[in-house]
Amino acid sequence: MMGTVPEWISVLVAAAALIAAVWAGLTSKRLFDVERKRDEVALDRREKEQASEIAAWSVTYDTPADQPSPKGLLIHNSSNAPVFDVKVLSTYSKTKRDTPETQKPLTMSVLTPGDYAAIEDDKFPWKFPETQSRVEEKVHSRLRPVTNNPGWMVTGIAFVDSYGTSWLRDERGQLLRLEKEETP
């Protein structure tokens, strides 16, 4: 019972339709996975949008040769909204070869958009942060980043964005979302 030619053609067409349907299903799944991954990346980017615009680094300014370089921190917010509960962690070493010492954290209840500098203080760990231009005006020198001493650096900046999400930017600049109970 071999069947007739039209029956064989019908079987072949059905098999080809089945193969095409399986191929279309697999292609559709791959496309869906690509779109889902793209949506996840876009959501992650949106969630990090404000947080990615917050940073801090160590700064100093020129002083007479017989005086040590003053310690300072520059805190940068290029977003359009404030962030809250800011904590800047840093280390200091006079030279590259010295062992870095952990500094007292600089804390701020709110960081509005702009660049703010905090300079070391005799009585307290840090003077109250002021705009970068105001600090430069007071010290009669431009603030400059510390880029060649790995022991004198910001090791982390933690904050809460305007959506209530807690973040930590580590010493490598990597942005990490913190759980509510985590603190740096």
Image (tube, rainbow, N blue to C red):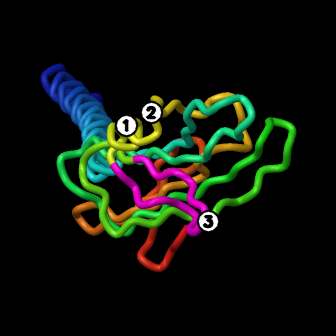
Q: Earlier in the sequence, mark 2 or mark 3?
A: 3
Would you say residue 153 sits in the magenta stretch? no
Q: Position of residue 98 (x, y in %)?
A: 85, 44
The secondary structure type at the circle numbered 2 is loop
Q: Residue furthest left?
A: 6
Check disc 2 and report the residue beneath it.
140
Q: Amino acid at mark 2?
A: His
The magenta segment is 117-130
In the image, 49 versus 119, the foreground residue is 119
Q: Relative to 105, is 68 above or below?
A: above
Would you say residue 122 sits in the magenta stretch? yes
Q: Earlier in the sequence, mark 1 or mark 3?
A: 3
Which numbered mark, 2 or 3, is in the foreground of this view?
2
Q: On the image, which quarter does residue 62 sit in?
A: top right
The secondary structure type at the circle numbered 1 is helix
Check disc 3 and report the residue beneath it.
104
Residue in the image at 54% along x and 47% along y? 72
Q: Are marks 1 and 3 in contact (CB under 8 Å)?
A: no
Check disc 1 and report the residue beneath it.
137
